[in-house]
Amino acid sequence: QVQLVESGGGLVQAGGSLRLSCAVSGSIISLNFMGWYRQAPGKQRELVAGITSGSTNYADSVKGRFTVSRDNAKNTVYLQMNSLKPEDTAVYFCKVIRGRAVYWGQGTQVTVSS
């Protein structure tokens, strides 16, 4: 069983930055996928950024502004969010995959004011 604990959400003005962290119980070296999703009110959950086999991918809406990274020593996945926009407001969820098992964090709220 893998447990994920997210942190770093909050309220920020447009143009500001936040860094989300996802602490993973156990080693992250063997994970097949690590990434971040978000869900805004009334919308479907969507992929924001992910790491798979050493490569990263991003939603078009965040390219050039968000960066996903990992720290194997700390078993942590990060999402650095710069130049935040009001439309980035959502609950952000960490997701990891090990084999066939999928694990989600509890979510952290990010609110960007205009």
Image: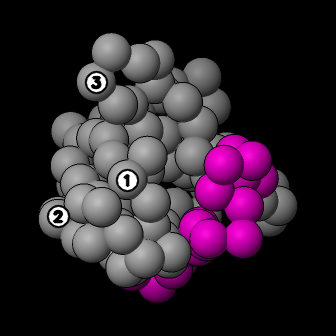
Of mark 1 and mark 2, the one earlier in the sequence is 2
| Secondary structure type for disc 3 | loop
Of mark 3 and mark 1, the one earlier in the sequence is 3
Question: Residue 49, percent across and down?
Answer: 62, 52
Q: Is residue 114 visible?
A: yes
Q: Amino acid at mark 2?
A: Gly
What's the residue at 32%, 41% (across, down)?
Answer: 90
What's the residue at 75%, 47% (across, down)?
Answer: 60
Q: Pointer 2: what residue? A: 10
Q: Pointer 1: what residue? A: 86
Q: Pointer 3: what residue? A: 41
The reply to whether dot 1 and dot 2 touch (C-beta < 8 Å) is: no
| Secondary structure type for disc 2 | strand
Q: Report, in whole angstroms, how far the alpha carbon at label 1 lies from the one at label 2.
A: 13 Å
Q: Which is nearer the eye, 29 or 87? A: 87
* Placement of 98 over or under 87, stated as above or below: above
Q: Amino acid at mark 3?
A: Pro
- Give the residues in magenta: 57-75
